[in-house]
Amino acid sequence: MAAQEHMASADGPPKVSLFNDPKIRGLFYQVLLIVTVVWIGYSITMNAATNLAKQGLANGWKFLGESAGFPVTQSLIEYSAASSYQEALVVGFLNTVLVGVFGIFIATIVGFTVGIARLSKNWVVAKMATVYVEILRNIPLLLQIFFWYFAVLRALPSPKNSIEFGAGVFMNNRGLIMPKPIWEDGAGMIGIAAIIGFIFAIGFSIWAKKQQAETGKQYPSFSIGVLAFIGLPILAAAATNFPFTFDMPALKGFNFKGGMKVVPEFVALLFALSIYTASFIAEIVRAGILAVDHGQTEAANALGLQRGPILRLIIIPQAMRVIIPPLTSQYLNLFKNSTLAVAIAYPDLVSVGGTILNQTGQAIEIIGLWMAIYLTVSILTSMFMNWYNSHIAMSER
Amino acid sequence: MKRVVLPVVVGAMLGMTATAANADTLDDIKAKGHVQCGVSQGLPGFSNPDSSGNWTGLDVDVCRGVAAAVFGDPEAVKFSPLSAKERFTALSSGEVDILSRNTTWTMGRDTALGLNFAGVNYYDGQGFMVRKSLGVSSALELSGASVCTNTGTTTELNVSDYFRTNNMDLELVQFEKADEVVAAYDSGRCDVYTTDASGLYAQRLKLEDATKHVVLPEIISKEPLGPVVRQGDDNWFNIVKWVHFAMVNAEEMGITSANVEEMKGSGNPAIRRFLGVEGSFGEKLGLNNDWAANIIASVGNYAESFERNVGPATPLKIERGVNALWSAGGLQYAPPIR
């Protein structure tokens, strides 16, 4: 060995045996790892397919077109027991998205409020926020869901003794029942007006920002935007002589008929998910704010800014850089935790899929579909949040 | 090169597990020394663990009967509580040897899932339970009602079909587990609780005040419940099938756990064949000839099992009804042993 090395070093660069070349060795192990992983994946898939065939289980996606045969309590699209499994899955998916989107919205607002409140100089407010965070984040979510569901259900009266809020709004242990607007000819104008109002609001805020940058003059762009978005549709409705009627709910037999209903399962799940996640968001927000150097506040004070604008214009924008990455995780958690819906009969994707799984026995397909959908939505969410994060990141010059 | 060996070994192991489930079930069971039995997560009268963890019930007795036939010991059985959703996967993957979990025999399940139904140990049907205070006397008065049930059963399909057929409105609230259905029904979320009638009697015991609820007379579906085995092992299928038939035949011939020893001296050739005194029927199943005698001695005949678990003397108070022997006007009928 020693003689060989000596000879190699004699002709210029030292020639090492292929086995000992770190580059080739590294490459070899990498390739080996990839081949092994691919091979394991391949053999697992083949095994599953062979075993399914052996057990006489039909596989494939044909079952999606068959009639589902079961009703769903809450559906955002037209759905009946005669619809197909595919439509049932879409209903479940939309219900999941509905609770996810509302949940993220509410959790963000509550979370930011509580997070800021924890840093308040007001002792009572700060302690209340602390109690909120410590209680809610330390109780398992499933228990909280059960608590809200069964506690709320027991407290509410039966349909016959509903709480009446007037104007056709009722609340009982079957849900919150409201009049349902029925659109007639010309109602499209209201929608168009709302879109125009929305575009105007965005345009105006861009214009106002530019004006402020150029001249320093400020406009109440937020109030004007809201006014346009709400006011224009009302004007349009008045101009077209209110082209809608209301389908009023009425007690008939066991339940209310007509109108639209928010089921208690949705309310309990939404409430539990958002206040639970909000307790984590509150801590993230608090950490983010504390991460901003106190000198920033002092500098803003020196400029004569007031507390509100300091928080809104100086502290929060800088804190966001710290807040966004962990906030993304919380959003993803909330979305995935919504699968606990199955425990309280909220017809989300997992609940509806579970029924289909049992009726058809297509376990691999349904579970694959579940995983693919949750993965896709979660990845899209985190891609958006990463984009937003890089958008607000400090641009160093 | 040590590092390369591990993934290869792991890969080889994953490859081998595929074949394990397909070996001869009876040999596997004899080798491991017990029967692995898939049961419910707790349904009084059918499969329910008591405070010390002993499983009892009509479905449990089928598994104990199989253990008695194979090992002569009704305790040589381990139980896997399964949800409705998990049960078929657990059976086809080989995790359990028998699924005895109030499972309805339907054509879809029999043909598409790679399973065989080994007889019917309880003829059930889906029913409705309501509060007495509603004053409802027939299921046809239930239009517009909120109905609670648990997911992953044929129940939601039946109730939906029934309401559609009779042009009635239905709000179906589907929970994952029976305990949550009971809690939701008890708290007034639903007017109606629907599941198999046997289940209604069993779950009624869990309500705050069982006497305030009534099971309506309509039975809207046929739910023949029975033990299930994997397709492709005919001998094992035969064993499970004949354990149930043995219990029914024993009732018909008047053989009970109390008189089984004495009956061995009987002159009746049918009884002598049944108890293994004559013939070699057990051997043809791959068992001992006293297989049936062991079942009856430890578990009892069908009537004993029924009375002990669900009959009028139990809290469930279920009458024999269609589950009586064919000779008494019921549906329980077993082919003869000869």
Image (cartoon, coloured by chain):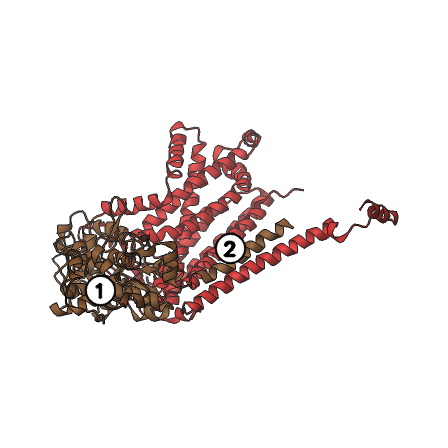
Chain colours: A red, B brown
User: For mark 1, does the 10 Å Cα neighbourhood hold few (<14), some (14 to 19), or many (20 or more) residues?
Assistant: some
The number of numbered badges drawn on the structure is: 2
How many angstroms separate mark 2 from mark 1 (CA)? 72 Å
- Residue nearest the observer in this picture, A258 or A84: A84
Please identify the quarter of the rendering in which residue B34 is found. bottom left
- Residue nearest the observer in this picture, B323 or A257: B323
Q: Is residue A55 above or below residue A124?
A: below
Image coords of residue A53 (percent x, y): 44, 69
Image coords of residue A8 (percent x, y): 84, 49
- Which chain letter goes with mark 2? A
Badge 2 amino acid: Leu
Front: mark 2 or 1:
1
**Horizontal placement of B214 versus B7: left or right?**
left
Q: Which residue is mark 1?
A: B277
**Horizontal placement of A239 versus A178: left or right?**
right
Check the image and name the residue furthest to the right: A11
**Horizontal placement of B14 versus A359: left or right?**
right
State the mark number for residue A380. Answer: 2
